[in-house]
Image (cartoon, grey):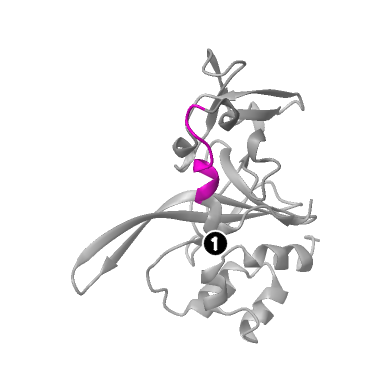
Amino acid sequence: MRKLLAIIFMLIIGYTAFADDNPEAYKVKVTKADGTVFEGYNDTKFEQYLKPKVTSVSISSEFKGPAVKYSSDEVKRVEFIALTMDSIPMIFEAVKAQTKLPNLFSKNPKPYKEPVFLRLIYDGENVKGYAMPYTDHTFTHKPNIMTVHYTWRYFYLTKDSDVAKTYWDDTDGIVPNMKKVMKFYFREFPDIVKMIDNDELTPQMFRENPAIVLLLMDKTYQPKP
């Protein structure tokens, strides 16, 4: 399925689409690591998934019934059924993922010790895109105030890799030398670097919609030799 699964600025909406007492809001289709598929009910409100590093999920066979806790090693995919037919499906996959953005001193950050459940936002032939809740701390000098807002961290996973790489933490803060930063994050994709150099992909375009690069990654990706 080669399409963007969620419009980024609408990600939050999917979590609050149903009333708390509507059983359909909690109904999920679960795919286990061994390929077994079953349906059940998630025992939390959608809002409780708005946190990073989720490594387990609890499922009951009946709405508000006794729940069984599954680790991210046991369950590979959770899909909220009520949103399957909506334009913004809610799908989580357990993925090995880097713990932070790469930098000059750590170009390939280590992944979390366990797979984490990430929101699937793009499912392509060569690349998958994911998002995870992230807390942005932005400091302003005039006045001296630290602001905190809840936003998203973005990942891509190529078909010949087993670790999803972090490529952006959505932030309100100023990022110096943004073009240079983008070229560093996308160095694995020479065609995207050329687009940045040619102003075909600008910092403003990228910051307005960080998922814009996922389709470009999918189209231009070259498998590792």
Q: Position of residue 147 (x, y in %)?
A: 28, 60
Secondary structure under tag 1 reads: loop
Q: Which residue is mark 1?
A: 107
The residue positioned farthest toward the left in the image shown: 143
Outermost residue toward the bottom in this view? 198
Residue 25 at x, y percent in the picture = 57, 32
Corner quadrant of residue 143 = bottom left
Q: Residue furthest top?
A: 66
Q: Position of residue 166 (x, y in %)?
A: 56, 56
- Residue 149 in the figure: left or right of residue 49: left
**Looking at the image, can residue 151 be seen?**
yes
Per the rendered image, the range of residues in magenta is 12-21
Q: Residue at x 58, y 44 (%)?
A: 118
Crowding at mark 1 (Cα within 10 Å: few <14, some 14-19, many 20+): few
37 drawn magenta: no
The C terminus lies in which quarter of the figure? bottom right
Report the front residue among 58 and 20. 20
Residue found at x 71% / y 64%: 215
Q: Is residue 78 something one can see in this rendering?
A: no
| For residue 71, side relative to residue 1 (left or right) | left
The residue at the point 53 percent across, 42 percent down is 17
Q: Amino acid at mark 1?
A: Lys
Q: Nearer the viewer, residue 35 or 38?
A: 38
